[in-house]
Image (spheres, rainbow, N blue to C red):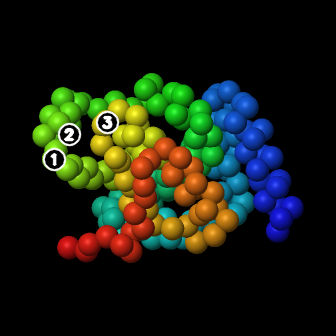
Amino acid sequence: MIIFHKLFYLFVYLLKCLPWFILYGISNFVYYVLYYVVGYRKKVVYENLTNSFPDKSKKEIKKIAHQYFRHMSDILVEAICEEKMVAHYQKHMSIKNPEILEKLYTTGKSVLLIGGHLGNWEWLGVTMQQLTPFNAKGVIKPLSNPFFNDYIEAIRARHSSGIIPFKQTIRV
């Protein structure tokens, strides 16, 4: 397992040296492997889409599933290359009406922003810390693989003032 970890970190280091257009080419390869070779969570994705969109045809569901796997592959590559994300966040993210947040901050108010898994939520964590005066914290659900969970949590911790495990949040 130690050899795998060393190879993974070498692979990540090499990835970070590549320009974005090559990284997105690699993302296309990752998509192909996840969807066609491994079939990672394919059944779950199709079941969820079918339940969420009962009026959609099988062809439409299949198209959405392909888009989902492409999107997840992009997110995976972008998360691995988080140093590049930090350098380029302004090209990808902005806050509308930042003066509202600034006013709340100067008056000592707390803010709760809620966002969904739209776009790349990892960009959001980096951006909030860069574009707002608030100590941004993200709610996370741990990954099932401990090695990859620790890796992703370390990335998130470098660019935010904290993460909150999902199980420690209040349910309403």
- Residue 18 x/y as whole percent: 72, 30
Q: Which residue is mark 3?
A: 132
| Of the pair 104 and 23, the residue shown nearer to us | 104
Q: CA distance from mark 2 to mark 3?
A: 9 Å
Vertical order, 128 against 91 (above or below): below
- Of labels 3 and 1, the one closer to you: 1
* Amino acid marked by disc 2: Tyr
Query: Which of the two discs, 2 and 3, labels the residue nearer the N terminus?
Result: 2
Labelled pair 1, 2 in contact (Cβ < 8 Å): yes
Identify the residue at image location x=17%, y=36%. 106
Label 3 vs label 1: CA separation?
13 Å
**Image position, residue 162 (x, y; %):** 42, 55
User: Where does the image place residue 10, in percent across and percent down from the top left?
Assistant: 80, 46
Give the residue number, with chain letter if any, for mark 1: 109
Q: Nearer the viewer, mark 2 or mark 3?
A: 2
Q: Are marks 2 and 3 in contact (CB under 8 Å)?
A: yes
Which residue lies under the disc numbered 2? 105
